[in-house]
Image (spheres, helix red, strand yellow):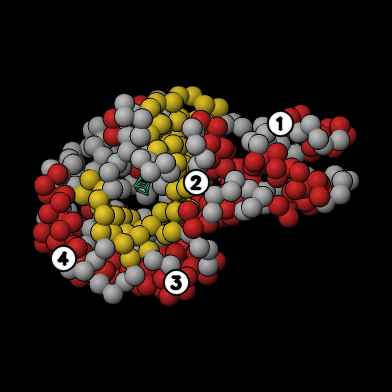
Amino acid sequence: MSIASGVAPDLRGLLLPELEEVAERLGEPRYRGRQLARWLYARGATTADEMTDLPHGFRARLRRDARISALALRRAETSPGGAATKFLVACEDGQTVECVLMRFDDGRRSACLSTQAGCAMGCAFCATGRGGFARNLSAGEIIGQALLIRAHADRRVSHAVFMGMGEPLANYDATVRAARILAAPHGCGIGMRHLTISTVGLVPQIHRLARERLQLVLAVSLHAPTDALRERLVPVNHRYPLADLLAACRAYVAETHRRITLEYVLIDGVNDGDAEARQLARLVRGLNCHVNLIPLNPVPGVPFARPPVERVRAFARVVRGQGIPVTVRIERGVEIQAACGQLRLRDGQGRPSRWTR
Ligand code: SF4
């Protein structure tokens, strides 16, 4: 990645000290790094030529010895109510990923970012999982999505969630690097506390993230209260069963003093009964957590359905009745197939994989 190594660095994936180092190596004072950061992250520059307050010679050396990764917008779709706009973007090698601008009634704007092209986790209800895994995204490609979303937003993008395509913690270094850039004062200006990283439950990486002590929100996708059921829905449970996952969650809370979010996709007749609600409450009792219930986003070709509204409410009531904080998350953008991976599948990339219930 460094100029010294002979590989042109992607400026869009660098933190301020690294940009200062690039400036120095190209014969400029360190403060030019700060100017670079402003152009890259505050103004969203896509070429060195746009950086008009930099000396001509420096811009020429940047063109020669560095690069800025580019994302090409292939398609944008806005839901009828305007709550979400979904973007399909192509990386330089032609891989496509999705990202979403979410608009909330209280004025918040949030960017939902992908961290991988495809996903290897194979969750049974997920369009991305059915498309298979292509590759990790670089930090620059993750930041590129945030910048593209910001350019299309009607207001300041105040939040970002790593909840698009892919398992963020399976691409740990790029994900954490992107989070640091998004949150840095010289970066995109989204506070660390307004960032959420989701994981399907990679236990070693949860421990590693805890040691970073970042003030972001960790969202763990639980989806089932027993190992038997979770193994059917989330295959990674074979490797990291619930006891290990919950122990990692407790360790994370102890280390960071941050409340953890537990995501639970409700699937009609599969994991949405009162019995599962009680098991869930028992499982997480004593953990400083908040449970997010997400009625399933229907995926074409996957024989799982969204539960009726009454069932969703009843499930929430049982969990809440056991003293566990719970909210029902309204999926924004069901109308535009905003479940992760659906635009990409429709676009022809990603191989539908075998699926067994
Ligand atoms: S739900 Fe997330 S982790 Fe599971 S297959 Fe889909 S993208 Fe991957």
User: Do labels 3 and 2 touch, CB within 8 Å?
Assistant: no
Label 2 is placed on what type of residue? Ser
Task: Give the CA distance from mark 3 to mark 2.
Answer: 23 Å
Badge 1 is on which residue?
Answer: 47
Q: Residues within 10 Å of mark 3 (few under 14, many from 20)?
A: some
Measuring 50% from the left and 63% from the top, which residue is drawn there? 215
- For the residues labelled 2 and 1, the Cα–Cα distance comes to 25 Å
Question: In this view of the protein, which residue sits in the foreground, 351 or 305?
Answer: 305
Find residue 158 and name its label.
Answer: 2
> Image check: 62 left or right of 204?
right
Q: CA distance from mark 1 to mark 4?
A: 55 Å
Q: Mark 1, residues whose alpha carbon is within 10 Å: few (<14), some, or many (≥20)? A: some
Residue shown at the point (35%, 40%) measured from the top left: 105
The numbered mark, 2 or 4, whose residue comes first in the sequence reads 2
Q: Residue at x 28, y 34 (%)?
A: 334
Q: Furthest residue to the front?
A: 106
Asked if one can make out residue 114 in the rendered structure from this viewpoint, the answer is no
- In the image, taking residue 54 as reference, residue 335 lies left or right, namely left
List x then y, in percent, for residue 327: 26, 54
For marks 2 and 1, the one nearer the N-term is 1
Measured from the top left, where is residue 146 in percent x and y? 53, 40
Disc 4 designates what residue? 321
- Amino acid marked by disc 3: His
Residue kind at label 1, given as amino acid type: Thr
